[in-house]
Image: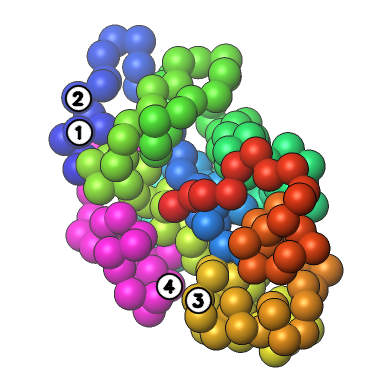
Amino acid sequence: MKNFDNSFLDERIKFIAGVDEAGRGPLAGPVVAASVIYSPETFFAGINDSKKLTENKREEMFPEIISHSICCSVSVISHGQIDRINILRASLLAMFNAVSRLEVKPHLVLADGNKKFTFTVPVIPIVKGDSKSFAIASASIIAKVVRDRIMKRLDQKFPEYLWAKNKGYPTQEHIKAVKLYGPSPLHRKTFLKNILPEFSTQDNLEVSGS
């Protein structure tokens, strides 16, 4: 994974930022993006696509990433903004914001997925980048940990939806709770058209995600 990132280095490209998001698919809560820059020689074991790591392993790697990186940053886009602009645009905005907030300006950005955003330096979309790029995988871990912590905190206000367990994703238990209690103020209304009849006629430009 580190060799993948370093293959982009040349006399003009010294700092590469990896960026990824977490939370495109959930019914509730924000989408979170993170961006990470490492020095070319930095490598340490344990980094992988966040989806392939246990929650405990992600928490273990979180401080390791922060301590080994040159800099890292996070952006959170609310459920309300997701409903207003759709999840794809919200995810790209979160990634743009995360890169913009880096203390060191990168010379190149590697973004997970097949879409890219416009930035002041080149942005290269990498399909399955979180399993190929050391920096993207690191960003995926940071984004996932931050979002999971948010959902655990929100679970204390809305325990009936079991967010501490499902993190807002459409599990059977979560869907059952939405049908029983109705949506919370933190649910993405544009994601509920297949669950609650009253939302079935609402415009929904983008409801799927990873």
Q: Of the residues under marks 3 and 4, which one precedes in the sequence? A: 4
Q: Which mark is residue 4?
A: 1
> In this image, 3 relative to 109: left or right?
left
Q: Is residue 44 magenta?
A: yes
Tag 2 near tag 4, CB within 8 Å: no
Q: CA distance from mark 2 to mark 1?
A: 5 Å
> Can residue 120 be spotted in the picture?
yes
Numbered range of the magenta stretch: 37-62
- Which circle's residue, 1 or 3, is located before the other in the chain? 1
Cα separation, mark 2 vs mark 3, equals 40 Å
Q: CA distance from mark 3 to mark 4?
A: 23 Å
Residue drawn at point x = 39 percent, y = 36 percent: 113
Give residue 136's position: percent from left, percent from top: 37, 43
Residue 7 has which mark? 2
**Which quarter of the rendered picture does the N terminus lie within?**
top left
- For residue 107, which numbered disc appears in the image? none
